[in-house]
Amino acid sequence: MKKIRVTNTDLECSAIVLGSVDIGSKLDEKESFRLMDDYLDGGGNMIDTAEVYGNWVPAIEKSISEAIIGKWMKARKNSSNLIVTTKGAHPDINEMQRMRVSPQHIKTDLEGSMKRLQVEAIDLYWLHRDDPSRPVGELIEALNEHVKAGKIRYFGCSNWQTERIIEAQSYAKEHSLQAFSASQVCWSLALIEPANVTDPSLVFMDDIMHSYHRESRLSLFSYSSQARGLFTKLDKGLKDEEIPALYQVPENRLRYEKIKKLSAELSVSINQIVLSYLLSQSFPSFSVIGTRTIEQLQDSMGAAQISLTAEQLEYLES
């Protein structure tokens, strides 16, 4: 598995990151353990989780994804082989309009995550959301306090707009503090229909953000990197009316045709083209994948071995 250095860290992270939204919920403990075992055996070393994962499922343990990952790391005694990571400061599932991005919420969520993951420190800790009404300086200060306390080593932001990232990085530099090492946003080859975005706190890749990452070389982790399997499903005959509302953009079918043509030329899968597009960027770029079977996992991990040329990237985008 190809490893990439996360910006301004000593973390060598696998290009393919295992998403854990379904761990402990749609996947039971046994299935979750097997999936994580297979991912680690395939050369992966980062499992993307969050304090909020699983909290939308009634009658199960709070933060079940973190809890199961913690049990797995303890059972396998393998935390030293992984980049331990999680996200906090997400709104309560039942009060999504009330932001929880504050020093106190960060502290509460971080300490709860450490307990569930059964670790003494988080290698890469993410703020899951932003609250633009809150001064960015107090968030950077709070995160640095946790670095000094040894609770986290590095930190990143998830669903932050470019201008807020720039503001945060500038504050850190001006005050000789550690800055964000990575950003995490929704990005794939699929174009989105803005009118169908149901959560306004989500942030999607755009031209301004792409330019910023090219220029700054800040690491970028893409979630929903497979667009919910859109292009693979189109290849299996998905009808236009069956396309998820978020991706109901006519150009996506045209992109599918290009993906299909390139996949045939390179003798790789549709999914591998979709992921390798992200992994072939000119800045440090990682794909967070969703998978439930070993076959899907192996196919996705194979994308890390594919490098697309600048011409091929332009072809897919055009």
Image (cartoon, rainbow, N blue to C red):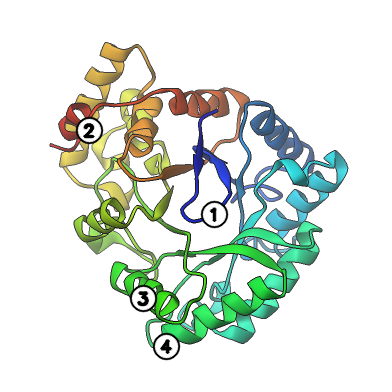
Q: Earlier in the sequence, mark 1 or mark 3?
A: 1
Cα distance in 3D space between marks 3 and 4: 13 Å
Cα distance in 3D space between marks 3 and 2: 31 Å
Q: Earlier in the sequence, mark 4 or mark 2?
A: 4
Of 93 and 269, the residue lying toward us: 269
The residue indicated by pointer 4 is: 135
Amino acid identity at mark 2: Leu
Q: Earlier in the sequence, mark 3 or mark 2?
A: 3
- Categorize mark 2 by other alpha carbons within 10 Å: few (<14), some (14-19), many (20+): some
Amino acid identity at mark 3: Ser
Q: Position of residue 206 (x, y in %)?
A: 24, 57
The residue indicated by pointer 2 is: 313
Cα distance in 3D space between marks 1 and 4: 25 Å
The residue indicated by pointer 1 is: 9
Q: Earlier in the sequence, mark 3 or mark 4?
A: 4
* Foreground disc of the pair 1, 4: 1
Mark 2 element type:
helix
Q: Earlier in the sequence, mark 1 or mark 2?
A: 1
| The C terminus lies in quadrant | top left
Q: Position of residue 263 (x, y in %)?
A: 30, 18
| The N terminus lies in quadrant | top right
